[in-house]
Amino acid sequence: SNLDDKHITFADHVAHVIVPHTNDKQITKDDCNRRDVSALDEKELGLNCEKIVQWVLYHTQNKTSQSISQSNSFDHFIGACESENSTSILQRARICDEWNYCERMSEISIHRTEVSERRDENSRQYDILDPAYRHDPALLPQRSNMDDNERHLNAAELFALGSVWYLPHSASTSIVDRFDPSSGVKPQRLNVGDMNRTVFWGDYFRIHFNPRRFTETNRFDWGSKFEDGHAGRSGQSFNKNSDDVNAKPGLVVARDDDAGYLVINKPPNVPVHPTVDNLLENVATSIGRCLWNERKDAILTGEYAFNHTTTKPREDAHSSSNSTIQYAQNSKTKRRRQKKEPLVYVATPQRLDQNTSGLLVVASKKSFAAYFAKLLRTKTSGQLISGGAGRNSTTDIEDISFTLASKSKSPCGVHKSYRCLVCIMPKTKLSEDSGTVHTGSVKTEVERLRKYQTKGTLIRHFLEPSIRAPKRFLSTIPAGVDDAESWAECLLKIAKVGDVCTVVGNAPSDSLARDLWGMHGKPNETCAVAELEIELLTGRTHQIRGQLAAMNFPLVGDVQYGGAVPSSSTLWQKNYGNKQNPDREIQ
């Protein structure tokens, strides 16, 4: 980009900033390609990361133009920075207190570890706490940042939420290399501890000033037991620090701290992992925050630091007759003690899509994460080896019918079953007068589903390698593609076809359609919906959604794969613009 003319640009809800020089000096291309910034020391600029974010928020909240080209506007902001209101000041103070408290806890753990183990300086690996576990997103505004009726997120809240990314000017030799992904130089996510970091002209910021929020996450207690639909209220609590009878609903179905796992009943509309603009509102971070809250008292008393770093001696340590073997075992145990896990460890070897609910295994120890990941790999590889037909088969997906033999069943004992609601779309074709004519029926399409069930058909597609969504699922790999081996094989079975309900033709059907599609519109081709039970044999991104859509049975409400009409489309405005409540959520 031409940095002579532009220092900040807006794209959707993201601001891209190249830090300008102050004192009415423009940045030239030669300046940006020069790594020596010693002439512009900290005193001259007097800027930190928080000021840059405040500058972006100043323009977004005051509805300025989409491009700020004059650096004097930046000088004006720095010279006469807006005074924050009392709410912002209090929120900033609270967030900083959360951060500083966790810093003190980490220091206590480090100190106790040093005293108890007295290890060599070169072998110390201190306990650290992930920045994601230090802040409670339930204390942030629970609506969109751009909602006129709600307070905007301030700079400190954006740092806490993980919505600010940074790449220093000195990270590469030229402005071109710095924005070339192949160079290996990537922005890093900033946290509250970085707010006072000094910045220099030419530094790059990516600020998600209106981050996506997943506030459904904050409705639950991720450390309490799920029981009879009243988890966290009448159920037993795993959270020792929680004795509130009015606690939020719990989600933990099973937990074993010795083995290092939890099984949770994941709610819908919650991502499993952090997103690029939201570090806090997801499954992994929520579980980690609960584990941290449980361990704070133990860290203060020193119990956690001691137990966390000491390996129990072998019971037969003195019964061995071979002193050489015993010495080797003791040496290995000593080396193991020098490696320290973080204060809180959370991993998600199993994944569910954001809108999918159901049981999810979460690891709280590295050993279990590796063990469970190996189980899933064994399951997948066993199915692929026994799948039949081969990757290069040209057989149409409609004709493939592989009955799994007993030897093809995975020995790992992990079986995945999903329930979903799909659209029934009778196939259509264009008539001679260019009109659209239905050539199939709901009955025909439902019979096709039941045929898959009764024959035990192994349904197979191949997933095109791509980081973008929606994914592309094809029954065969196209001829002539580069690196055909990178197309992932996807296998599933339809275990059960349940109830079928019409969504057109009468008042009850129309009412059901409104309830099902909510804020989105029903595709015109959809005449009915059917409930399916799916057995997933491989675990690929968007696999159920993509494979069923490829078979002309997209999931109800799935905009990306044809199961709903997005509310922003012209078709939705024409058919549903004045007929549906825009505030209604997808059921």
Image (spheres, rainbow, N blue to C red):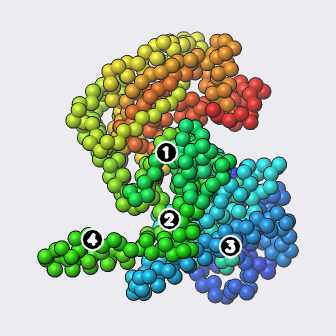
Amino acid under disc 2: Val
Mark number displayed over residue 195: 3
Residue at the spot of label 4? 314
Residue 572, relative to residue 61: is it above or below? above
Give neighbour class at mark 3: few <14, some 14-19, many 20+ (Cα, 10 Å). some
Q: Which amino acid, by three-letter code, is at mark 4? A: Arg
Q: Position of residue 351 (x, y in %)?
A: 46, 47
Q: What is the CA distance from the residue labelled 4 to the residue labelled 2?
A: 26 Å
- Would residue 14 appear left or right of 258 to someone viewing this image? right
Q: Earlier in the sequence, mark 3 or mark 1?
A: 3
How would you rate the neighbour count of disc 2 (Cα within 10 Å): few for under 14, some for 14-19, many for 20 or more? many
The residue labelled by disc 1 is: 253
Amino acid tagged 3: Met
Left or right? Give the position of 373 relative to 323. Answer: right
Please state which of the two labelled residues, at mark 3 or mark 1, is closer to the viewer.
1
Q: Please give the residue where the numbered disc 2 appears in the rendered image.
A: 344
